[in-house]
Amino acid sequence: MANNLNIEIAPLSRVEGHGDLIINVKDKKIEKLIFRIPESPRFFEAMLVGRKYDEPSHITSRICGICSVAHTCASIKATEKALDVKPSKQTIKLRKLIYHHENVQSNVLHVYFLAAPDFFGVGSVIPLAETHREIVNIALRTKKMANDMVRIIGGRAVHPIRTVVGGFTKLPTEEEMIKMKEMLKLCYTDLEKSLEVLKTLDIPDFKRETEYISISDPVDYALYDGKIKSTDGWEIDDQNYLDKINEKVVQHSTAKHCWASRDAFMVGALARFNNNHDKLTDNAKKYAEELGLKAPCYNTFMNNIAQFVEIVHSVDDSIKLIDEILEEGLDEDKAMAEIKSKAGRGVGVVEAPRGLLIHDYTYNDKGRVEKANLIIPTGMNYANIEKDMHALVPSIIDKSEDEIRLACEMLIRAYDPCVSCSTHFLKVKLINR
Amino acid sequence: MSKPKVGVFGFTGCGGCQLEILNLEDQLLDLLNAVEIVHFTEAVTEHSDTYEIALVEGSVTTKHGVERIKKIGDIAKIIIAIGACAVSGGLNCLKNLYGLEKAKDLVYGDKKDWIDSIEVKPIDEYVKVDYYARGCPPNRFEIVDIVRSLIVGRKPEIPNYPVCIECKRNGNTCVFELGITCLGPISRAGCNSRCPNSVSGCEACRGVIDDPNVNAQKDLLAEYGLTVEDILQEFNLYNACKGKTIEKNKNNQ
């Protein structure tokens, strides 16, 4: 490998959205490295102004097709907090259930469709359908199961309809609950087969310790609700996120950059695992162990493995949730809580598949949004992605240009960046000087 | 016959329409066998600028986007707009309603000059669109039907009747009965009335039927003391750009 580097990949594919990575290397030293997000900003904070309390969850769902349930739930939680609406326990359980399956759907999409082709040395899932038909079929089956779960509970796989402020416009039937449990049980054979395949993958050896932030709960492996927790030793109430999470506009990106205790932090499956691994089901813990995922894990590439472990956890925990809901009996009277419009501010924090997601709304006394602030997981990761690249590139500088290019792409892809959320696509450019 | 070369392109939107294509789980591998995907950045690394059919998601909201959509218009023989953002500008048009400069001030403050953002427009403001797969998200089976129709050389059937027809067929209680405002009487069917099926009002994500004054469910609206005009007022969530077009047409008449 020459001392100077000139690689251009445009666009980087198999990520959701649009961006550039620009790296200038001279005499084996990085002169310039920026992860640029040039994609179109959406202005959701402006779109929300003046909207009535029942609209923000429908509007913000459209921030991202892949994690529309997460945006819907963060939005609903913010509004319920602001208007002092108290959803029933049944509602919370059903939200946790639908939430699991957006996470499963998204993690399957990323692990099998977007990340796996790199490990098999191909450009997409299409050739894998020829060479590794069974694993592709497993992915399609698991993804369909998760989407069907979201369809049954939410009325639609992308942009759910029934999940609204106060509860659900329509409940699943008892028969549907039983059917969902059967669907979940059928997953285990496929998960075991996937485990055997994942064990054979050669995960790059890379280590860079950083701050990992996620929500956390004393009992649950928190996805839907919890306090905000950092591996740097702090924990805060979600309403006070501004005490720790900072945001700034940077010139090379339409997505804002974030920092907390240090100059960058990581969110997502690996951050959740590092903070909450002890809350995983025993079965999920067993999968983690077999795949060599152990907390604290500082290898960003292992985010893919953490995502798979979460799929196992979500399947296990869903069966438990369904049993509880069935035992208590579905109650139409608990489907919707009472809503009265009033002035107030509320913050909704959830774990989107890609990490911590924050919606913060202020309502006026007519129940219309006066001010909205949204902080998106991929946006939180950008600064950390740049830090990782600074660590990765020098360590592989002696490899071939193609190898460096692939490693950079894989590292960014490991974050499962969703640029639509943070604004939007990905190109990698390594520029020679 | 050789397989048609297909490109899937994303503009400003949520990526949900492309996801709906991937959500065709049972039919995905068959679909991939029937066409040759040459460009699909969300799912495939390889890409080419030679394609006959372009599936376009998202609205045009940047200067760079204008150049990209025009290039696609030059290459593709057939353009299919998928999803409300591409078809009508969709929810993105709320930015226009708020005011472009005001929105930039609010979100990016004194750094707003760094941002490339123009008035939101649907793609047919820049290129000729041959077929529209409407909705937010679009009906994935309708996308397949349009592509299949193209392959076998027949015209895809896109409904031009209100959502009420599908809703009645599904045996739903009319949500007006429950005090919920519903745009079903003027909105284009083809979604199998999925929102009313979930006891929610239709939000007209598939846009309005052609000539709503002739084709709307006026009787039903009258029953609840509403007119087509009243309900068009509610029509801005997914159709703020087209809503303006409707206004424009009315003013010109």
Image (cartoon, rainbow, N blue to C red):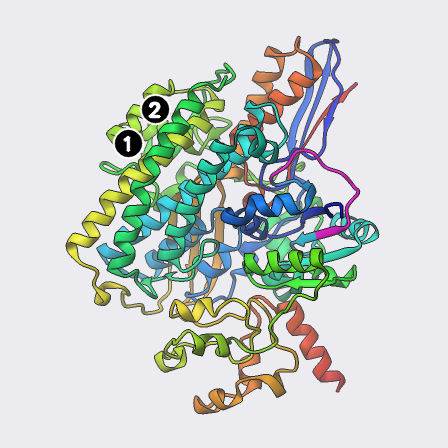
Q: Quadrant of residue A104?
A: top left
The quarter of the rendered structure image containing the C terminus of chain A is top right
Q: Which SS class for mark 2?
A: helix
The quarter of the rendered structure image containing the N terminus of chain A is top right
Which residue: 76% across, 20% down? Answer: A6
Res. A294 in view: no
Q: Which residues are magenta?
A: B43-54
Foreground residue among B186 and B92: B186
**On the same chain: label 1 and label 2?**
yes
Q: Position of residue A13 (x, y in %)?
A: 64, 35
User: How would you rate the neighbour count of disc 2 (Cα within 10 Å): few for under 14, some for 14-19, many for 20 or more?
Assistant: many
What mark, if any, has residue A288 been given in the picture?
2
The answer to whether the residues at label 1 and label 2 have Cβ atoms under 8 Å apart is yes
Q: Is residue A400 above or below residue B179?
A: above
Q: Is residue A86 magenta?
A: no
- In primary-sequence order, the first of circles 1 and 2 is 1
Which residue: 27% across, 47% down? Answer: A181
Which residue: 62% across, 27% down? Answer: A122
Outermost front residue: B1
Chain on which label 1 sits: A
Q: Is residue B210 above or below residue B14?
A: below
Which residue: 69% across, 12% down? Answer: A400
Outermost left residue: A327
What residue is disc 1 on?
A: A280
Three-letter code for the amino acid on which mark 2 is drawn: Ala
Three-letter code for the amino acid on which mark 1 is drawn: Leu
* Image side of residue A14 versus residue B179, left or right: right
Q: Is residue B45 magenta?
A: yes
Please identify the dominant SS of the magenta region.
loop
Frontmost of labels 1 and 2 is: 2
Chain on which label 2 sits: A
Q: Position of residue B53 (x, y in %)?
A: 74, 52
